[in-house]
Each structure stands twice: as structure tokens, then as C-alpha cells.
Amino acid sequence: MAGCLFCAIVAGDVPAFRVAESPSYLAFLDIRPVFKGHVLVVPRPHVPQLTDLDLDLLPGFFTFVQEVAAAVPAALGAQGTFVAMNNVVSQSVPHLHAHVVPRTKGDGLRGFFWPRTKYASDDEAVSYAERIGKELGDGGVTPAG
């Protein structure tokens, strides 16, 4: 869809630190992560919110999110993940996306207050994307590349 940032990322018109991809879904690093390794998972077709996702894509989307949620802690040494999705309210990009945020006990995340950080460099972001993508490749999802 014209003007949609995530559609432009899916099309390759806007660069992103891709973590993994499939014919129907894409996972890439959030450029303003809550914690480093924060991944966004999107369907390739433009879908504004969860209630608009075609039923035939629903199981695959959540399977893909589940695989990313398993890979993030394994790749980064985190204890778990926070998986969240906004629909309309607080949805900064109107394209369905699930947040997969690495979590560690005592990390400071409280409720829905999401402090943001930055990667020190593109090289650091690439390192995070590659580590998570490698873990996903071991689980059957094709890492981006």
C-alpha cells in the first residue's frame, strides 16, 4: 500500500535489519527497540490490524510470531519475551505487527511503559538480526539474508 512504511520494508524499498522471512511474513528489528533484539513481525500483504487479517493467514502469522518468540531468548541469552500488538490506538504504523521484546528479570520494563533505546551502530543492529535469524534458521524458518 502506498505510503505504508512496513509495506515499503516488505518490498525492499526501505532498508531494515531483517531477521527472518517466509512467503507470507517478515520479521525485522524495531529501529527504536524497547531492548536490543526487539523484533517486529508483519504479514507481507498490507493488513491494517488484527481484525483485518484473512483467516487463512492467521495460523501462519501466529506460528511465525511463536517461532520468533522462541528464537529471541535463545539467541540473546534473555529469560523470555514480551509479545504485544496494538490495534489502532498506539499503533504507530497502521500495518499489523507483533512486537517480540527480549525480557530478563529486573530489566526495568513495567506495565506498558516502553522506554526506548538505540543501537550503537548499524553493525550492532546487524549482529542482533543475524543472531536471531540464525536461531530461527535452526527452527525451520528461513532467516532473512
Image (spheres, rainbow, N blue to C red):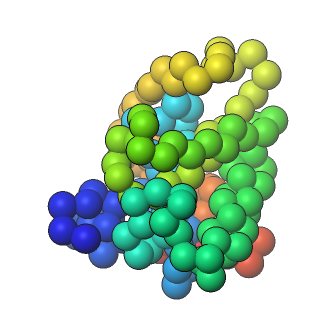
Residue drawn at the location 27% of the way across and 57% of the way down: 5
- Note whether 141 is above or below 79 in the view shown: below
Taking the image as drawn, is residue 55 in sight?
Answer: yes
Along the line of sight, the residue nearer the viewer: 57 or 109: 57
Residue drawn at the location 58% of the way across and 24% of the way down: 112
Residue drawn at the location 72% of the way across and 68% of the way down: 63
Where does the image place residue 61, in percent across and percent down from the top left?
62, 69
Where does the image place residue 67, in percent across and percent down from the top left?
73, 63
Tell me where residue 36 sits by quadrant: top right
Taking the image as drawn, is residue 136 in sight?
Answer: no
Where does the image place residue 133, in percent across and percent down from the top left?
61, 63
Where does the image place residue 47, in percent across and percent down from the top left?
42, 66
- Note whether 46 is above or below 15 in the view shown: below
- Note whether 95 is above or below 21 in the view shown: above
Along the line of sight, the residue nearer the viewer: 116 or 44: 44
Along the line of sight, the residue nearer the viewer: 1 or 51: 51
Along the line of sight, the residue nearer the viewer: 54 or 23: 54
Q: How many marks?
A: 0
Tell me where residue 117 sits by quadrant: top left
Residue drawn at the location 54% of the way across and 76% of the way down: 54
**Residue pushed farthest left?**
3
Horizontally, residue 33 falls left or right of residue 1, namely right
Q: Quadrant of the N terminus?
A: bottom left
Tell me where residue 82 sits by quadrant: top right
